[in-house]
Amino acid sequence: MVAEGDPPNYAQKLGVHKDQVVQELGWDEDTDDDIRFDIEDACGGELLDEDADEVVDVVLLWWRDGDGDLVDRLMDAIAPLADDGIIWVVTPKTGKPGHVQPAEIAESAPTAGLMQTSSANLGDWIASRLVQPKSKAAGRHS
């Protein structure tokens, strides 16, 4: 039961659960610690930083207008990702500093070999869920 005034469950919105390995990319002073702490609580461990070299289930990519080339960043994020892993591109909402046009994500994802499947409202941030197409992931095992 959720009591009135309880904070939103960000990890649940992102589908993060116990024992998943989550890597965080693009952290900066403006990232939302409530989102970060909620994810750490849900997965039961700390978020891995950019230098981690293990296979990850989820990449939390904080992205703002002016951060560079999103396709390049997504390609970097795919490298440690498990075949069935998820990349969440987390951007400031419309009207917030650093807002990213949804079309930028929609156009960058397929160029990087990803598909956009859904989004999640995270307070002042919006998260876009990107996955690797099943045929590509399946092809790696043959």
Image (tube, helix red, strand yellow):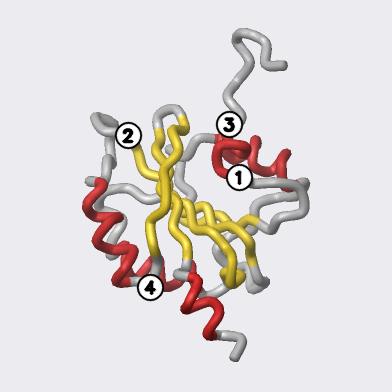
Question: Left or right: where does residue 79 sit relative to residue 102?
Answer: right
- Secondary structure at badge 4 equals loop
CB under 8 Å between discs 3 and 1:
no
Select label 2 or label 4 by which is in front: 4
Q: Is residue 57 above or below residue 128?
A: below
What residue did someone put label 3 on?
A: 34
Q: Which residue is found at the position 27% from the left and 35% from the top?
A: 97
Crowding near pointer 4: few (<14 within 10 Å), some, many (20+)?
some
Residue 113 tag number? 4
Q: Which residue is found at the position 32% from the left and 48% from the top?
A: 64
Residue 15 tag number? 1
Residue 133 tag number? none
Q: Of marks 4 and 1, which one's residue comes earlier in the chain? A: 1
Quadrant position of the C terminus in the picture: bottom right
Q: Please name the amino acid that badge 3 sits on.
A: Asp
Q: Of marks 3 and 2, which one's residue comes earlier in the chain? A: 3
User: How far is disc 3 from disc 4 in space, using C-alphas?
Assistant: 30 Å
How far across and how far down the image is residue 115, in percent?
A: 39, 62
User: How far is disc 2 from disc 1 in space, using C-alphas?
Assistant: 20 Å
User: How far is disc 4 from disc 1 in space, using C-alphas?
Assistant: 22 Å
CB under 8 Å between discs 4 and 1:
no
